[in-house]
Amino acid sequence: MDKTRRRDQYPLLGDPQQLFEGDNVYVIHEKAEIGKVYSFKCPHCHSLFISKTMNDEVMKIKCPECETYICFSSRGEDGNPAKRRTQIIAESEFPTREGILVWNKGGQIKSHVLLPGETIIGRADSNELSDISIEDNTASRRSVKIVVTKGEQSGKYNFKLTVLRTTNAVYVNNNALYAKSSIYLNYGDNFKVGETVFTLIAKDN
């Protein structure tokens, strides 16, 4: 069997959408099934290649023909997002790369680089402004904050999410959090504010 026929027998996963204009990183919002082989079409050079999803982390694969990267995440065999409990990890284990929040707004990918300091996320409201305002009536105003710190000597980042207020629970990897709860985020973690799902990914250096 030639390579073209071999690629054609595997389903094509999603439609890669560019993360930043002029960048070489693309995101697929359709979730893959763990342990399944998929075909991918490079949005830059249009070459076809295949990859197998090995776990429920956010995967980042490189086109074998060019410098384009495609990111996507996986779900369990039952079709539900794979449940992973985020662990608070030691500061020494945090990586030295900035984080980017990615979410879908009306079919368009939005992104926000998490610089050291505090970022507030919540429902759009002219009286109580958030750093990231979402048009989501199921979300609370100024619902969560993410505090980013960077070690002066190690240069390593950590990302601490705290729920400020919420009518409905905030979900981190399908685990419910309520007001005054805090948790550290790792790359690949998803959290849901209202009906809006955010994913933390690593910024390319």
Image: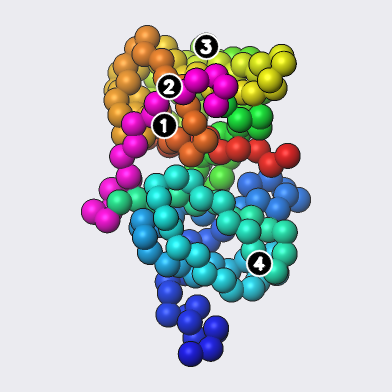
Q: Residue at x 50, y 65 (%)?
A: 51
> Which residue is situated farthest in the bottom direction here?
1
Q: CA distance from mark 4 to mark 2?
A: 35 Å
The magenta segment is: 77-93
Q: Position of residue 73 (x, y in %)?
A: 45, 49
Viewer-side residue, 199 vs 64: 64
Q: Residue at label 3?
A: 127
Q: Quadrant of residue 192?
A: top left
Q: Given this view, does label 4 or label 1 mark the residue nearer the observer?
A: 4
Q: CA distance from mark 3 to mark 4?
A: 49 Å
Local secondary structure at mark 4: loop
Q: Are marks 4 and 1 in contact (CB under 8 Å)?
A: no
Q: Given this view, does label 2 or label 1 mark the residue nearer the observer?
A: 2
Viewer-side residue, 153 vs 111: 153
In the picture, measured across the screen, residue 121 lies left or right of residue 192, that is right
Say the numbered circle drawn on residue 88.
2
> Which residue is situated farthest in the left direction here?
78
Judge the density around disc 3: few (<14), some (14-19), many (≥20) Cα neighbours within 10 Å: few
Mark closest to the chain's N terminus, 4 or 2 = 4
Q: CA distance from mark 4 to mark 1?
A: 31 Å
In the picture, measured across the screen, residue 189 lies left or right of residue 78, that is right
Say the numbered circle drawn on residue 128.
none
What's the residue type where badge 1 is placed? Phe
Q: Are marks 3 and 1 in contact (CB under 8 Å)?
A: no
Local secondary structure at mark 1: strand
Q: CA distance from mark 3 to mark 1?
A: 25 Å
Q: Residue at label 1?
A: 191
> Which residue is situated farthest in the right direction here?
22
Q: Quadrant of residue 64?
A: bottom right
Mark closest to the chain's N terminus, 4 or 1 = 4
Q: Residue at label 4?
A: 64
